[in-house]
Image (cartoon, rainbow, N blue to C red):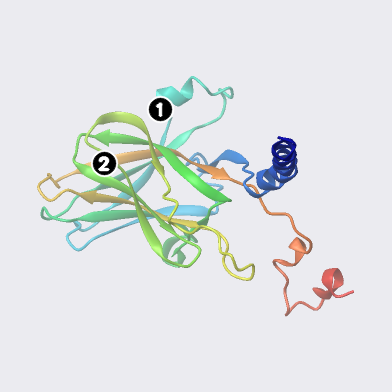
Amino acid sequence: MKQGVVITVFVLMFAVVCTPLAAQDSGVNYQTYMVETFDSPESSEITWNGIGSKFITEGYPILKYFDGMPNALRVMQSDSDKEYKFLGVQFKFNRQGDNWVDIYPAKGSGDDAAPYEIPLKGVVQRFDLWVWGAGYAYDLEILVRDCNGRIHTLPVATLNYHGWRNLAVTVPTNIQQRSRYLSQLKYMSFVAFRIRTQPTENVDDFYVFFDEFKALTNTRTASYDGFELENAKFDDADSNKEGGK
């Protein structure tokens, strides 16, 4: 009997000691942040461009900003003087089939604009954004690049509804977002929105609108002795001041 009591007490003490350590290893700090508001195209470093597949009609896609926002968002805004905008995209194809359009971020303007993948904070659990649908059976996808350089396609929704909807997609856990090697690329990046036509759907004229692209992410960072050396620059003459004492 006494032996059983001793074992029970030992197990309880072990659990009490180990629980804080386990909590430290599995700690999370979830935050929602705005990846793109589409509100300030004039001052933003990022521009949005579009490219279509083989049978895109010449002159398309067309991208344009419009004033306003979904009514469901407007009632929550406290700053009535701010000018809100959203992004519109129009395109058409010359024939039905497996057609697609990518709407991607870029830096630069005109002929100097180059695709730019938006770095994402922490480990993303979910994306959500507002999308206006026009009733077409077109599929919206999000393209992301993992920390190893592989591109993954996240199916969001079919846009065969009318008006604004808040759409969301969960990021699968098998997508590696953070490298275990401190000296390599550590986070996932956003590549593009892709809209893909279903083979039998009309392709004569389609437009769609985007607003408030957000991410729910775990921003917890590991704390360890020497974390400041993650971004050490060996070609910098001053880089030995922190760790080279």
Q: Kindly give the residue lying farthest to the front in the view shown.
A: 1
Residue plotted at (46% across, 42% down): 126
Q: Which residue is mark 2?
A: 207
Residue 195: x %, y % from top left: 28, 49
Which of the numbered marks, if any, corresponds to residue 70? 1
Q: Kindly give the residue lying farthest to the top in the view shown.
A: 75
Question: Callout 1: 10 Å neighbours few (<14), some, many (20+)?
Answer: some
Residue plotted at (60% across, 68% down): 181
Asked if disc 1 and disc 2 are in contact, CB closer than 8 Å, the reply is no
Please say if 81 is above or below 38. Answer: above
Q: Secondary structure at mark 2?
A: strand
Q: Quadrant of the C terminus?
A: bottom right
Work out whether residue 4 or residue 199 is closer to the camera in this orientation and state it: 4
How many numbered marks, from 0 up?
A: 2
Residue 50: x %, y % from top left: 34, 55
Residue plotted at (75% across, 44% down): 17
Work out whether residue 45 or residue 240 is closer to the camera in this orientation and state it: 240
Task: Report whether 239 appears left or right of 62.
Answer: right
| Disc 1 to disc 2, C-alpha distance | 16 Å
Task: Report whether 167 appears left or right of 242.
Answer: left
Work out whether residue 183 or residue 143 is closer to the camera in this orientation and state it: 183
Tag 2: amino acid: Tyr
Tag 1: amino acid: Pro
Q: Quadrant of the N terminus?
A: top right
Q: Kindly give the residue lying farthest to the right in the view shown.
A: 245
Q: Earlier in the sequence, mark 1 or mark 2?
A: 1
Residue plotted at (35% across, 36% down): 131
Q: Secondary structure at mark 1?
A: loop
Task: Report whether 20 appears left or right of 238.
Answer: left
Question: Callout 2: 10 Å neighbours few (<14), some, many (20+)?
Answer: some
Quarter location, residue 89:
top left
Task: Report whether 245 appears left or right of 152.
Answer: right
